[in-house]
Amino acid sequence: MQVSDAEVMLDDTLNFAKRAQEAGVRTTVTVEPHGFHIYHYFLPEAPETLAAIGEIGSFLRAHG
């Protein structure tokens, strides 16, 4: 999961990840500092976005 530290859904994301982990689901959470909701969409060329998309690609290659 990816979320920013300024995200309105930060607590929900962290709680969801915790519950998934407690249920035995392999879960990773990346918290992007100084971001905002769906920063991937609004800042497609930003280094943070490119890193996040790379992380998604790595996950899909490993688990897809």
Image (cartoon, helix red, strand yellow):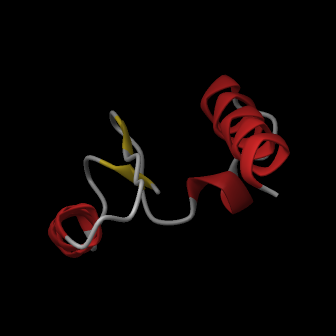
Q: Is residue 20 above or below residue 61?
A: below
The image shows residue 63 at horizontal and vertical percentages of: 73, 52
Q: Is residue 5 above or below residue 49?
A: below
Quarter-of-image position of residue 35: top left
Residue at the image point whose x is 67% and y is 36% from the top: 55
Residue at the image point whose x is 64% and y is 38% from the top: 52
Q: Is residue 17 above or below residue 27?
A: below
The image shows residue 2 at horizontal and vertical percentages of: 47, 52
Quadrant for the C terminus, please.
bottom right
18 vs 38, nearest the viewer: 18
Quarter-of-image position of residue 18: bottom left
Q: Is residue 8 visible?
A: no
Q: Is residue 49 visible?
A: yes
Residue at the image point whose x is 68% and y is 24% from the top: 47
Considering every residue shown, the one lying at the far front of the view is 24
Residue at the image point whose x is 30% and y is 65% from the top: 24
The image shows residue 5 at horizontal and vertical percentages of: 26, 46
